[in-house]
Image (tube, grey):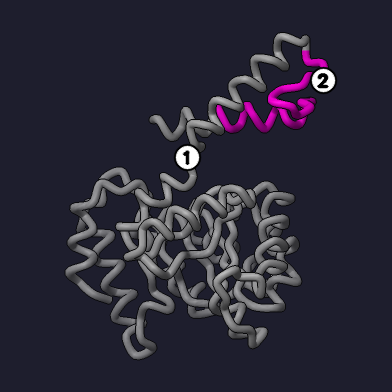
Amino acid sequence: DTPKLLLNATLCPADAFVFDLEDAVPADRKTDALWLVDAALRALDYGHGEVSVRINAGQAGIDEATFLCGAGVEAFWVPKCERVEDILALDQALSTTGSPALLVLLIESAVGVENAYELVRCCPRIVAASLGVEDYLRDVRAERTEGQAESAWARGRVLNAAVAAGVMPLASVYPRFEDLTAVTAYARSARAAGYRGVGCIHPAQIEAVHAGFAPSADEVEHARRVVEAFDASGHQAVAVDGRMVDEPVYLHARQTLAEAEDADR
C-alpha cells in the first residue's frame, strides 16, 4: 500500500515480483492496497519479471484474485491454507474469469500441516508450497529458537508433501535481511534439506540466497569424479573417495552438476 515502492520496483531487473495484500498491509488499508496494486499492474511496466500477488485468506482472497485477474497477475500466493475446499473455490473463481494464474500455497497452522499433502495435490494450478513458520509457531504456542527444532517436524512434513505431490518446496523467509552471511548459511541449510528456493523479504537477500543454493567448488569436483567413475564402470557400483557409489548417489551427483551449470548462468 506504499505507492513509491510500487513505482521503484519497475527499476529492478528482477525475475519476479510479489505484491503483498496480506500481512504487510494494515486491516484498514486492504481496499486501498487492492486498488493501488491493480492500478500499478495496469499502468507500469515490470519488464520480464513474473508478477504475483499475495492475497488474503478465505473469501476476501478469492474476491481479490478475481478483481486482479484482468491486471495480468501470473501467480497468487495463498496464505493460511487449511482446507481443500477453499483452494478449489479459488481455482473455480479463477477458471470462471479465464485466468491461467498459478498458485503458491502458504501452510501456516497445525491444521494446515496435518492436511499438507491433500492441499498441495488438490489443484493443477499449484506449483509450490511453503510453511509459514511464524504463524505456525503462534498457532502451536511454540517459541522460535536458533536451531529451529520447534518447527522441524512441520517443515519436514510440508517439504515431503510438496515433493510427493510434484510441486516445488520453498523454505520459509529469513527475517534478518541485514546479516547476509547468515542469510547465505540459511539458504545453504535449506538446499541441504531438499528445498528448491527460499522466500526473500528484501532485495538484499537475493544474492546471498543464490550463493547458498550454488554448489561449492568441492561439491562440484566430487560430483564430477562420481559421474566419471560410475560411467567408466558401466554403471556398476564403484568406490569414490572411500565411499561406495551406486545409482542413487550417481543421480544425485548429476543433479549437483546441473545445479552448478544453472548457477553459472
The residue drawn where x is 60% and y is 27% is: 222
Task: Name the image quarter holding residue 80.
Answer: bottom right
Residue 79, visible in the rendered structure? yes
- The mark found on residue 214 in the picture is 1
Q: Nearer the viewer, residue 90 or 190?
A: 190
Residue 81: where, in percent of width, then height?
A: 62, 72
Q: Nearer the viewer, residue 159 or 207?
A: 207
Residue 31: within the magenta? no
Amino acid at pointer 1: Ala
Q: Between disc 1 and disc 2, whose residue precedes?
A: 1
- Label 2 Cα crowd, 10 Å radius (few <14 / some 14-19 / many 20+): some
- Left or right, 152 with respect to 134, comes to right
Residue that sits furthest to the right in the current view? 236
- Left or right, 80 with respect to 16, comes to right
- Relative height, residue 212 to residue 153 (above, below): above
Amino acid at pointer 2: Ala
Residue 156: where, in percent of width, then height?
A: 70, 61
The residue drawn where x is 20% and y is 56% is: 44
The residue drawn where x is 39% and y is 56% is: 181
Q: Secondary structure at mark 2?
A: loop
- Left or right, 195 with respect to 238, comes to left
The residue drawn where x is 72% and y is 55% is: 160
Residue 101: where, in percent of width, then height?
A: 48, 54
- The mark found on residue 138 in the picture is none
Q: Secondary structure at mark 1?
A: loop
Residue 256: within the magenta? yes
Q: Nearer the viewer, residue 16 or 215?
A: 215
Residue at label 2? 237
Q: Which quadrant is the N terminus positioned in?
A: bottom left
Q: CA distance from mark 1 to mark 2?
A: 28 Å
Magenta region: which residues?
A: 235-257
